[in-house]
Image (cartoon, rainbow, N blue to C red):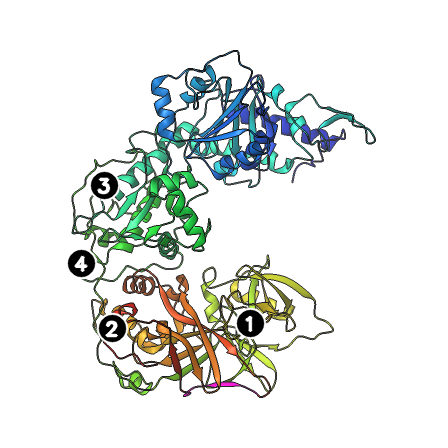
Amino acid sequence: MENVYGNPHSQNISSKLTHDTVEHVRYRILEHFHTSTEDYSVIFTAGSTAALKLVAEAFPWVSPGPESNGSRFCYLTDSHTSVVGMRKVTTAMNVTSIAVRPEDVCAAETRGTAASDPDCQLLHLFCYPAQSNFSGTRYPLSWIGEVKAGRMCPVSVPGKWFVLLDAASYVSTSPLDLSVHQADFVPLSFYKIFGFPTGLGALLVNNRVAPLLRKTYFGGGTAAAYLAGEDFYIPRQSVAERFEDGTISFLDVIALKHGFDALERLTGGMENIKQHTFTLAQYTYTALCALRYPNGAPAVRIYSDSEFSSPEVQGPVINFNVLDHSGNIIGYSQVDKMASLYNIHVRTGCFCNTGACQRHLGISDEMVRKHLEAGHVCGDDVDLIDGHPTGSVRISFGYMSTLEDAQAFLRFIIAMQLHQCDGQPLPQTTPGEVGAPSESEAQDAVPATMDRCSSSPRKDAPTDSGVSNDLPTTVAAVGLCPPLPMATRTQQTPSEKAAGVLDGGLGPRVITNLYLYPIKSCAAFEVTKWPIGSQGLLYDRSWMVVNHNGVCLSQKQEPRLCLIQPFIDLQQKIMVIKAKGMEPIAVPLEENGERTQICQSKVCADRVNTYNCGEKISSWLSRFFGHPCQLLKQSSNFQRSAKKRVKDQSAGSTATLSLVNEAQYLLINRPSVLELQQQLNASDANGKEELFPMKELISRFRANIITSGTSPFEEETWDEISVGSLRFQVLGPCHRCQMICINQQTGQRNQNVFQKLSESRARKVNFGVYLMHTSLDFSSPAFLSVGSQVLPVLKENTEHHELPASTKHQDVIS
């Protein structure tokens, strides 16, 4: 707003201003780490990963030869993926890579192993993190000097060792004094310190090492001179200018100065941040260790190498898995979904640190390979395989974290695992509220013994948040109750009997309701008879609402989508959209081919061709939501192929999808809903009103086909179903997310539905099954109708012990 900045590779006024400002930022960065340009150079990179890659490519590796075994690249097993990935560069040079366990390095430190033949010219590199990004363990900074001096060697080989200190996680909450701990290379990521700017990091290079670095490629701004027609190139003298290929992100670099200034102004410095964040982590750790079920079983399993005794050995990171009362691990995906209902965002998985994940979770190399064969890849939500966890949950504290945040998290853990012993339901929160149970509920929890000492947060920790110290500064132990047993079946209402829900009987299975959802994540349109298209019910999920960036919105981000009510008029070929406080608006069912401009969008990782439905409906949606939105429709001539192949499909053909998540249809069974309803209503202490009417509960699951089956969850034993001449393959269960907690009539959240479903379904949170056409003849119109009989075919080898508890002793009819 106040200056004009230009490309720094020029001599005009704006370019000179940019160059001088960037140089000042370099000084400011080095000042932050208690050093100067006399000892270190700052090379700006695209992040800490790019900084690591730069070292791997520029380090003066010596390949093995007749006279030597070559260089060694050694790294701690508790290292980020980006460190481990450096070995691919060294492998290409025939340089040996060695992963060293933390305990082995500690043993070498104790022994004081010395390198042999100090005159040897071989150069080796040892990489280790100042702080584990998995567990928060802080490794001794003294290793830097010990390894460089030859008093300690990660591997006993002759030569000179250099040290790369991965400081990306550590410096976000702690001071690093490079005048004392003079690492040769220090990669950084600035967004981990400030939250902004992303995509900008730096490599701090010790000036004594810089002349050894080698570079092959040269980009704009790095050359003092070169010839286009001959192999002549002279690099610039400055280390930074030699390695910063092209134009750096100078506006983001300039922003760093303001980041450092704001950090200092808000906190008083990194030492204050270090003490503040550690105290919050220590407080939370102590409280988590205290949580016990009535049978004495712990509520969480914490993965740590320390007792959180000091910020010198432990950073403000807690890594854990939640346990049930029997000691079984609850998958991290389940915890993640529950946390989001309480407006708490956690990190889950292995956190790009497979080595630490294997060590702490007891995952062998063979298990990693088997997990991959089972379909698990890094970053997905496959959290348990054969009962063994594939990852964990991690929380971290930063300078902006407060005591209220820690207490809100603890209340969430308590609420997730404890229904009160007298059967009280989980406390509810409003969509904008952070935290979970009320203060009285935390106070009413059953006491239990603690096996670790309590700890108090700093006296000056923020406490003006309005949260009462029901999780006091001296941590009180809290007892946990196991999940309630499955509710017994109660007598049905006449309306349910009329719908064909015969309690344990063997009445006919029929379609009781049909719903389509023309606009993805918006309200249902109920019909009694509806035509079938190639992608499912005609016009089901054909439209979607996107934000100003073109990203598809769902009720997870915008719960009010359920208040948008579409109606389709096939005769007039329009869709009328209504919402409270808004005038109805009509949208054509099909595009005008002459004027339509096709754009590309993304749905569930699939590319889809769509077109914009116009400015009029965009303005209507934007007014309703209070922020810019657009309505897009899938192009009628675009074929989105299903990922799962359907049986009896002709060779070379694949089923097609609309804007649905996984399959053409979703089916739920009324007895399954009824069982869940009874469990939910049994949790109501008052017992005066039906908290979840059947129709309202059905609407939460957003199914297309509602059937009246004979027993709860029998649909999960089906392989196929027939409705008249139509045949459908059952693809498998629908894995539910947080959207089932949203009341489709009001847009309000209630965590009980997800919680109760999780408890009753052995933490799977499956409800309903996906269907796909097996074969469809379009020579004559096809319809689905309410009242049509549903004929299922059971899966092969279905045995009684595989069925849900409520169906074990009933006859299975194919």
Mark closer to the chain start, 3 or 1? 3
Q: Where is residue 607 drawn, in percent x and y?
A: 60, 61
Circle on res. 475: 3
Of the residues tagged 3 and 1, which is closer to the observer?
1
* Quadrant of image for the C terminus: bottom left
Mark earlier in primary sequence (2, 1): 1
Q: Dots 2 and 1: beta carbons under 8 Å? A: no
Determine the secondary structure under disc 4. loop
* Mark 4 vs 1: CB contact within 8 A: no
Mark 3 is on which residue type? Val
Q: Nearer the viewer, residue 626 or 122?
A: 122
In the rendered structure, the answer to whether residue 107 lies left or right of residue 265 reads: left
Q: Position of residue 287 (x, y in %)?
A: 25, 42
Q: Counting residues from the N terminus, which is met first, the one under dot 4 or under dot 1?
A: 4
The amino acid marked with disc number 1 is Ala
Rendered residue at 20%/44% (across/down): 477
Looking at the image, residue 314 lies above or below residue 758: above
Numbered label attached to residue 655: 1
Judge whether residue 782 is colored magenta: yes
Q: Which residues are magenta?
A: 781-788
Q: CA distance from mark 2 to mark 3?
A: 45 Å
